[in-house]
Amino acid sequence: MTEKLNFQLKHENCKRAVLLFHGMTGSPFEMKKIGRALFDADYDAYCYCLPGHGTSPISIKEVKWEDWYHDSEKHYLELKEKYEEVFLGGLCMGAVLALCIAMKHPEVKGILGLSTTLYLDGWTIPWYNFLMPIGLHTILRYYYSFPEREPYGLKNEALRKKIAALQKKNTVALDNYPMSCIYELLKMSGLARRHMSQVHTPVLLIHSKEDDLTSSKSADFVYKHISSEIKEYIKLENSYHLVVMDNEREFVFAKCIGFLNKLSNYNISPKTEVAV
């Protein structure tokens, strides 16, 4: 199923590309709309399933954050060989990955940080969240999962019902957050926070004021601690966590494209599309 969820949207002779990273327990499915919007704006767009995602709930419990990072870096380096400009964009955990890659690769042209998740402190985090450290730092993390529940990251109720149905089938994302996965995300996020000043790449942050998974504390931290001379921060009023799918998605796409266009040296429309 992993290969079916991956996507590559390419023009002929395009000199710029955006590598997108999906969120924790998600898949490229959640990035398809922004991928198409970027493609229509004359960017090649790529997104791949992160290790342990798009397969089964069991396999994700065996993955370390280093696996996510090295797989993402590999795809970045591949695109770097093909394109004059490579941008990174990520949702949730994917935004953290993009920032981590930029720490090591300052030549990254720009970053789209969407619902950046450095902290799991959103308003739907279970009331028993205070017990999480007990599980995270013991063998229990390999045996317990937090079930994902309403609102599934979406303020749009009609779309929420569709996504909930797909998640129950595990066709586009898992319907739970394995504690082992949360443990690895928080390890990577802690590392990212400690080294955030190493990011010099231009960054656009977009975060909902009502994010149900991670409060704006995460984006606030990034904006305050990155060393980027070019940085923008937009807060949304009518969305939850999945800002690339929710009520303000078209606004999000427009802001992302506008930000990339200001950075790109190749704002000339390619003439021919390549079917993939």
Image (cartoon, rainbow, N blue to C red):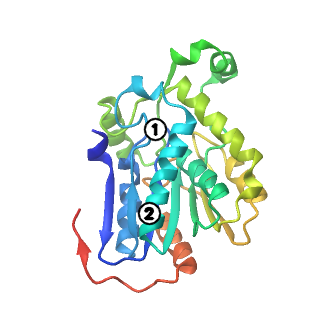
- Of residue 57 and residue 70, the one placed in the foreground of this image is 70
Crowd around label 1: few <14 · some 14–19 · many ≥20 (10 Å): many
Residue pictured at 57% horizontal, 49% vertical: 97
Could one spot residue 139 in this view of the protein? yes
Residue under pointer 2: 79
Specify which label sits upstream in the sequence, 1 or 2: 2
Position of 164 compared to 147: left or right?
left
Mark sitting on residue 198: none
Residue under pointer 1: 152
Position of 7 compared to 102: left or right?
left
Q: Secondary structure at mark 1?
A: loop
Residue pictured at 47% horizontal, 33% vertical: 150
Q: Is residue 125 above or below residue 18?
A: above
Do tag 1 and tag 2 residues touch (Cβ < 8 Å)? no
Residue 249 pos. (x, y %): 45, 60
Residue pictured at 33% horizontal, 50% vertical: 6
The amino acid beneath tag 2 is: Leu
Residue 203 pos. (x, y %): 63, 65
Residue 50: quarter of image? top left
Quarter of the figure with the N terminus: top left
Q: Secondary structure at mark 2?
A: helix
Give the alpha-carbon distance from disc 1 to disc 2, as whole Å.
Answer: 32 Å
Residue at the limit of the structure toward the left, as seen here:
275
- Of residue 116 and residue 55, the one placed in the foreground of this image is 55
Q: How many marks overall?
A: 2
Crowd around label 2: few <14 · some 14–19 · many ≥20 (10 Å): some
Residue 100 pos. (x, y %): 63, 51
Q: Is residue 155 above or below residue 247?
A: above
- Of residue 242 and residue 35, the one placed in the foreground of this image is 35
Could one spot residue 240 in this view of the protein? no
Residue 270: quarter of image? bottom left
